[in-house]
Amino acid sequence: MAVLRRMARRGQGADRGDRGVRGDHGADDPLDAAQERRVRAVLALGGVPQADLPDGVQQVRLRLLERAASGREAPRDVSAWAAVVASNLAVDWHRAKRRQERVGERLAQLRHPEHPSGEDTSVLSVAVAQGLDELPAAQRQVVVLRFYADLPVRSIAAELGIPEGTVKSRLHTAVRALRARLHEDEVV
């Protein structure tokens, strides 16, 4: 919720002192008590920890105020709009959490790099080669150009005369098939 905290802090500035006890948001509060409870429920059901719920509620308020300040009309159903925004914030919270976990894993690997044995490497190489042989020619071609020749997607598309999206699609399908093959063979 660090993302939510940072974003909410940007909008709190001057009115921070105007707020009294928790829940006493004054007449200019864009969310009434029922809407706030609904936002909290959506965030909680979305997996946001209890400690981060107030930040999420503040973020919904901030977005509603920013919408009004930009001159756009208020949503027809503020409660429904706030619930959708809360749901999106919960998704963002999970994405940020996963991103932080991946960064932590990458940093841990830098500290303790794993060096597979020669036998593990050769078993993996043979399995990948067999998997490549089973791929359709078009998929095998983009995999080889991308991962063995180390060409960027843009260059592959230009060289083959196909759209970048087609290259990405073929890569995605081929990598998924290779991954499935390696899991079936219990190589990885």
Image (spheres, rainbow, N blue to C red):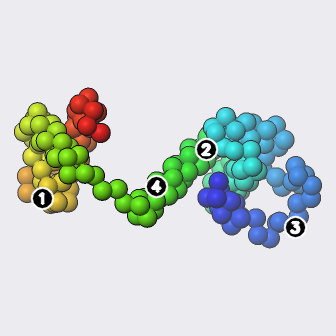
Of the residues under marks 4 and 3, which one precedes in the sequence? 3
For the residues bearing labels 4 and 1, Cβ distance under 8 angstroms: no
Question: Which residue is labeled 3 in the image?
Answer: 17
Question: Which residue is labeled 4 in the image?
Answer: 105
State the separation of the CA atoms marked 4 and 1.
27 Å
Amino acid found under the numbered disc labelled 4: Glu
For the residues bearing labels 4 and 2, Cβ distance under 8 angstroms: no
Of the residues under marks 3 and 2, which one precedes in the sequence? 3
Of the residues under marks 1 and 2, which one precedes in the sequence? 2
Of the residues under marks 4 and 1, which one precedes in the sequence? 4
Q: Is residue 162 above or below residue 76?
A: below
For the residues bearing labels 1 and 2, Cβ distance under 8 angstroms: no
Badge 3 element: helix
Mark nearest the camera among 3 and 2 is: 2
Residue furthest to the top in view is 184
Question: Which residue is labeled 1 in the image?
Answer: 149
Question: Which residue is labeled 2 in the image?
Answer: 90
- Horizontally, residue 169 falls left or right of residue 145, namely right
Of the residues under marks 4 and 2, which one precedes in the sequence? 2
Mark nearest the camera among 1 and 2 is: 1
Amino acid found under the numbered disc labelled 2: Ala
Image location of residue 165, percent across then percent down? 23, 47
Name the quadrant containing residue 72.
bottom right
